[in-house]
Amino acid sequence: MLFFQALFFIIIFIIGVTKIFINFSRKEKISKIGLIFIVVPILIATYLFIYNVISENYFVKPTKSELIGRYHVVDATVSGFDQSTYKKYSLTLNKNNTFTLTTTPYIDLCDSGKYEFDYADYYNELYFRCNQSGNSAHIDRHLNYYRIEFIIGDPDTGESIFFEKDK
């Protein structure tokens, strides 16, 4: 999907440059549409670059030792997940790379097993392993906190369950 969006903006940019060159070669005024087709992709690319730099440098990026601890559900975008039961569900990450998870609706994962942590796999920084199966989770980073996000079903639906570390 990202590839097609980038391709779309590149094509728009090329159309804008072409339109300006055509007008320039005909000694006509510079086309407003040509300028818009050049400026909009540049602004979007600049925004995305700045956002990535800020997110990498200023959003909380916990280390493995900072991840160790007990977490509880703090938010869920899954319809039918009762908010009054959030505190019932916990996730514990131990120093020896083991975890325990209370049976949580919509999360298809065993009660205990091993976990792996790696920032190299964007959007799947945590991987929970149970015997022959497993599940991945994302570290949802913000300016002054982070949450562990289990994406439920198809990622395009936006359904997730978020765990935040107990204080």
Image (cartoon, helix red, strand yellow):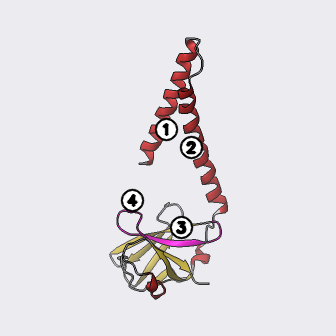
Instruction: Work out how far the residue at label 2 is from the one at label 1, CA to CA, in angstroms.
Output: 9 Å
Circle 2: residue type: Ile
Instruction: Work out how far the residue at label 4 is from the one at label 3, CA to CA, in angstroms.
Output: 16 Å
Q: Could you say whether the residue bearing mark 1 is in a helix, strand or loop?
A: helix
Q: Disc 4 or 3, which lies upstream in sequence?
A: 3
Q: Look at 39% across and 72% down and name the residue there.
A: 78
Circle 4: residue type: Asp
Asked whether 53 falls inside the magenta stretch, the response is no
Give residue 79's position: percent from left, percent from top. Answer: 37, 73
Task: Determine whether label 4 and label 2 are within 8 Å by CB.
Answer: no
Instruction: Work out how far the residue at label 1 is from the one at label 4, CA to CA, in angstroms.
Output: 22 Å
- Residue that carries the numbered disc 1 in the rendered image: 9
Q: Could you say whether the residue bearing mark 2 is in a helix, strand or loop?
A: helix
- Residue that carries the numbered disc 3 in the rendered image: 140
- Residue that carries the numbered disc 2 in the rendered image: 44
In terms of image quadrants, where is residue 44?
Answer: top right
Give residue 15's position: percent from left, percent from top. Answer: 49, 27
Asked whether 153 falls inside the magenta stretch, the response is yes
